[in-house]
Every structure is written in structure tokens, then in C-alpha cells.
Image: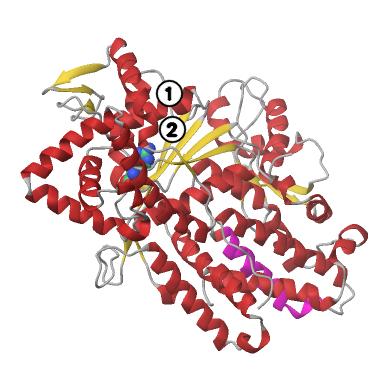
Amino acid sequence: MGSLKAQLAKLFEVSLKVTVPNELDVEPLVAACNGKFGDYQCNNAMGLWSKIKGKGAPFRGPPAVGEAIKNNLPSSEMIESCSVAGPGFVNVVLSKNWMAKSIQKMLIEGIDTWAPLPPVKTAVVDFSSPNIAKEMHVGHLRSTIIGDTLARMLEFSKVKVLRRNHVGDWGTQFGMLIEFLFEKFPNFEDATETAIGDLQAFYKASKQRFDADPAFKERAQQAVVRLQGGEDKYRRAWAQICQISRTEFHKVYQRLGVHLEEKGESFYNPYIPGVIEALNKQGLVEESQGARVIFIEGINIPLIVVKSDGGFNYASTDLAALWYRLNEEKAEWIIYVTDVGQQQHFDMFFKAAKRAGWLPQGDSSYPKASHVGFGLVLGEDGKRFRTRNTEVVRLVDLLDEAKVRSKAALIERGKGEEWTEEEIESTAEAVSYGAVKYADLKNNRLTNYTFNFDQMLNDKGNTAVYLLYAHARICSIIRRSGKDIEELKNKGTLVLGHKDERDLGLHLLQFAEVVEEACTNLLPNVDYLYNLSEIFSKFYSNPECKVIGSDMETSRLLLCEATAVVMRKCFDLLGIAPIYKI
Ligand code: ARG
């Protein structure tokens, strides 16, 4: 069926074909306007006029074109009235009856009926992707949160999403780590996570050893060769180190409720030589200062695909991974979520893929590769976020602290007496992890953002806590009514009589187009959710819109329920668990 906007666009498309039959494929320009003249506006008249004037069209200016667009609009129960304003804007006032019916229909059939149409069949979202034995830092947290939301939005739109954890599990650092492991643990297979303790510290210590002792360095370099040659003992040691990291990463994913499927850099390693050879055959790979490179128009440094020592690098792996995703996994959209610092890398390697003809030249057709970049996470001091004693903030500590604070806030609200320990735990978790995610997502993705517990855990303002509480309050209104909402959905009738009810209804109906747009731009729109709760408040606090005990009770309860359903879907898309009471 498509979003409200898409449905209107279809009507205008029909009208445009009749109005200007000689202009082919005029795309209807329809936008929400929330002005006093209407809910939506079609803005084609002015542009069309400049195209057709002087060509004998039967109009005397843009307003006349607008008038014709209006008159040729097929009749539809969606539309209450239409008018032309100014230089030819066609304003549409939606029918309240239709709006109310559509919302009630969604209540009965489920919010999935409001899912946007899938932009593609299969997509890869490459996100989180920390490096083995190195820290999983707040940058990876951002990638994890943003990537998960993008994946959720696409999944809601019925896209098959391959959630890829492109972990850094290959490279020369493993020689050093393996040698160090052998040295510390002659029976290295017994070296469990607890024995090694902190893998980051292990990494540091081995690096020190590597830098200080030439004999060790020599052995480490040999170890890389033996690992890459597939020698069993070295493969096993490598696998063990990876496993220890993996367990660490997994703890964070489990807390955040994020699902990822690991296909690390090592997975693509066997594909690299073939892929480079194919590019070479196309004449794209050239020699430059001992390395083999691909030159890219407009950029003065080339993309290095084979290092001068014959080894492969980050870019060679990414080329092989892209080839695999396009050809083996048949993905039509490949989305990479990393900090903006890697933008040039992605820009260059996408351009190389275009030169090779793997991707079409323009950015509007598929298959498509997109880099979703984000800014740094800063501490209160405006510098890169770090804790006082360690250099990097451990993600688990961060989540722990958020939870402790949320729990304290609940106790302060007196929930200690009212709720079971379990309820307090699960609510504190939902609120705190939700707050961390929301604080990240609500910021402009590209700018740096300052991590601040007090701000994100505030129960007022644009925070997850405020929104989660708002949702819980709506649920409690419904509970307090004592009515069976499932029964009302089918037996009651939703009407949008009051202006505040209509405003709320319109905002609810715009959910689908907001998700659609967020999927297209890869920008989750959290303002929609915040505005929804503001518009709901306005409705609910208006004495003219009294819910419980008024003669409009059934209808208004249904409107409350619809708001709760849409809020929950928004939470779901943002990876936030809802709470039902407060
Ligand atoms: N491991 C990289 C990092 O920590 C991110 C990998 C992103 N994905 C990719 N296909 N390059 O910065």
C-alpha cells in the first residue's frame, strides 16, 4: 500500500499524466506541510510551467497549472478537500474519516502493515567490526548502535539483512601475539580467557616485547608466515586468541541485544588473489613504488592493493569482501558503518569498484555501496572519551555504570517497596541501555558527541528515559480504564473529532514515510518519536480531550493504544526495550 505520502503521490501521478500528457514521467513532488491550508502539498506546478510555457499548453501561468492538477486529481476517500495557493501549490486536506479508519485498521492488522516497501531484496550491513586483541572502544559502540538500527529498519521493510561483523582477525600483529602466547604459555591450549586476563594488556605486553627484542621480532615475523602458510599449531593459537576476544565482544552484544554474524577479515583472505588478478586482467592494477595499486580519478594517492612486500592490506580485504558480497551473497546494497576517519578509504575503494564495473557509476541505482560515517565520542573535557586511569573506556563498565545510576533513580522514586527485585533489574536495564543508545542516535551522526550520563539519564527533555516513561504512562491509562483494548479494536470506533486528536492521528499516519525516508538516507529519525510524545501530551493534557470517563472514551483509548503501538515500534527500530509501567 505504501506510506501516506506515497499514496498521495500515486494520485498526483495520475493527475499529472492527464494534465500534461506530453511530458513523460513527471515525478510527483508531494510533501507534508502542516500549514493552515492543508496537510500535504503538491509542488509540481511551478517547475512544470517553466518546462511547458511557449509550447502551446493551454495554461496561462503556474497557478493555472496548479488548478488543472487539482481538477484532474482522481477522487479518493483519502482526500477531504483540495485548494490551490500562491504560485500554484496544490494543498490537500486529508479526510478525518479515512485517517481514523486507517489507524484503526493498523490496530487490527498490526503495525507491520505500515512497513515501507523494500528498497532492495538483500543488503549487507557491515558494522561494529572491532579488532581482535585490541580494544573495543566507544567508536565501535557507535558503530554497533547505528548499524543495528539501520539493520532493524531495513528488516522491518522486509529486506533480508546480512548483519556482518567484519572483525579485524588477520594481519601481521598475529605473529607477535602468537609468539608471545607460546612464550607465556608453553601449553598454550590451556591459556583460557581467565589465564590471559585482559587481552588488551596482553597485546601491549607482546608489542613491548616485539619492539625490545630483535630475536623475538624475528620469531614473530616467522610466525606470520607460518600462520599464513596454514601450519596447524599456528592456526590453533590464532583461533584461540580470536576466541578470547570474541567472548569479550559477545558480552557487549548480549547486553545491547545486538545480533551480528561474524565474517572477519580472515574469511576473505583466500579470495584476495583471484580478485586482484581479475582486476589486473581488466588493466586496473598498476605498479607504483614497488606496490600494486589502482589509480582513481580525482584523487592523487592511489589505492594500494598489494603492499611492496607482497602482503595484502585493509583495502585488498575490502575489495575481496565486496566481491564476495555482490557475487556470492547477491547483496544489492552494502552498507558500512565506521567513524568518518575512514571515509577516504571507502570513497577510494568504492570508486575502484566502479572502475571495475562491479557497481554502476551513479549513486542512485543498485547494486550500491554506502559508507555511513559518524563522529567521535567525546568526554566532558571535549577530548576523545577516556577514563581517568585507563586510556580507553571499557564498554561493559560504561553499561554497568548506566545501569547502576538507573537503578538508583528507580529506588529514589520509591520503586524499591513497590516492585520485585526482578522488575527493578529489568527496568533499570531497559532504561539505561536504551538511554545510551538513544543519546548516540539522537545526535547528528557526523558531528562528535559528548558522552554525559547525567544528560542521557535525565527523565526530562529529549531522552530515552523521558520517552520510555511517556510510553509507560500511556499503558497505564489503558490499564486504568479497565477496558479490554483487544475487544475495543474490533468493536469500538476510532474518530478524530478534536483538532488535537486529528494532529495526533496525522503524526501517527506519517510513521511509514518517516521510516521509508530513514531507510533511504540511512539516517534514523528520532525526532519523530520525540514529537509523537509531545503531540500526545498536548492531546492528553487538554481537558477537552478527557479520556477515561468521557463519552469519547472508547475512541480515545484506541488513539492511546495506537500511540503506544507506534512508540513501541520506534523503540524496536532503535533497539530499545520498552517498559510498561512506572
Ligand atoms: N575493523 C575496522 C576498525 O576497527 C572496521 C571495519 C569496517 N568494515 C570494513 N569492511 N572495512 O576500524
The magenta stretch spans residue 220: no
Please name the residue shown 28% across and 38% down the image.
344
Colour style of the rendered protein structure = secondary structure
- The image quadrant that residue 578 belongs to is bottom right
Alpha-carbon neighbours of circle 1 within 10 Å: few (<14), some, or many (≥20)? many
Say which mark, if any, is on residue 359: 1
Q: Which residues are magenta?
A: 528-547
Disc 1, disc 2: CB below 8 Å?
A: yes
Please name the residue shown 73% across and 51% down the image.
111
- The image quadrant that residue 19 belongs to is top right
Q: Secondary structure at mark 2?
A: strand
- Per the picture, the main secondary structure of the magenta-coloured stretch is helix
Q: Which residue is mark 2?
A: 369
Q: Secondary structure at mark 1?
A: loop
Which of pointers 1 and 2 lies earlier in the amino acid sequence? 1
Residue 75, image x, y percentages: 82, 38
Residue type at mark 1: give it: Leu
Alpha-carbon neighbours of circle 2 within 10 Å: few (<14), some, or many (≥20)? many
- The image quadrant that residue 531 belongs to is bottom right
Q: Is residue 423 above or below residue 1?
A: below
Residue type at mark 2: give it: Ala
Please name the residue shown 73% across and 77% down the image.
542
CA gap between label 1 and label 2 equals 8 Å
